[in-house]
Amino acid sequence: MPRVEVRNDETLERALKRFKRMLEREGILKALKAKKHYEKPSERKRREQRQAFSRRSRTS
């Protein structure tokens, strides 16, 4: 679990921004959104195939 300590010369808004960046880097928000609704295994495979296709088309 990410943890951010507010420094003496830092505002709360700045610390919150650092915390959100940390969550984004670790992929926690993406995982949370993915788990929000149930996804059937066939839908998951289809989504992963589409993502792989788009990655391949971008690199070529």
Image (spheres, rainbow, N blue to C red):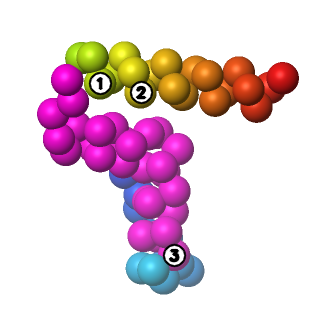
Along the viewing direction, whichever of 35 and 20 lies nearer the viewer: 35
Q: CA distance from mark 2 to mark 3?
A: 36 Å
Image spot of residue 60 (x, y percent): 84, 23
Q: Residue at x 76, y 31 (%)?
A: 58
Instruction: Report if residue 11 lies within the magenta region.
Output: no
Q: Are marks 1 and 3 in contact (CB under 8 Å)?
A: no
Q: Is residue 48 visible?
A: yes
Q: Which residue is mark 1?
A: 43
Local crowd at mark 1 within 10 Å, few (<14), some, or many (≥20)? Answer: few
Look at 51% across and 75% down and name the residue there. Answer: 14
Q: Position of residue 26 (x, y in %)?
A: 46, 39
Q: Residue at x 45, y 80 (%)?
A: 13
Q: Position of residue 37 (x, y in %)?
A: 17, 41
Which amino acid, by three-letter code, is at mark 2?
A: Arg
Amino acid, disc 3: Arg
Indicate the secondary structure of the residue bearing disc 3.
helix
The kind of residue on which mark 1 rests is Glu
If you read the primary sequence from the N terminus, does the residue marked by circle 1 or circle 3 appear first?
Answer: 3
Q: Quadrant of the N terminus?
A: top left
Circles 1 and 2: CB atoms closer than 8 Å? yes
The mark found on residue 11 in the picture is none
> Label 3: few (<14), some or many (≥20) within 10 Å?
few
Which residue position is annotated with label 3? 14
SS majority, magenta: helix
Is residue 2 something one can see in this rendering? Answer: no
Marks 1/2: CA distance? 6 Å
Q: Which residues are magenta?
A: 14-40
Q: Which mark is residue 47?
A: 2
Left or right: 35, with 27 as reference point = left
Position above or below: 49 against 10: above
Query: Is residue 56 rendered to the left or right of residue 16?
Result: right
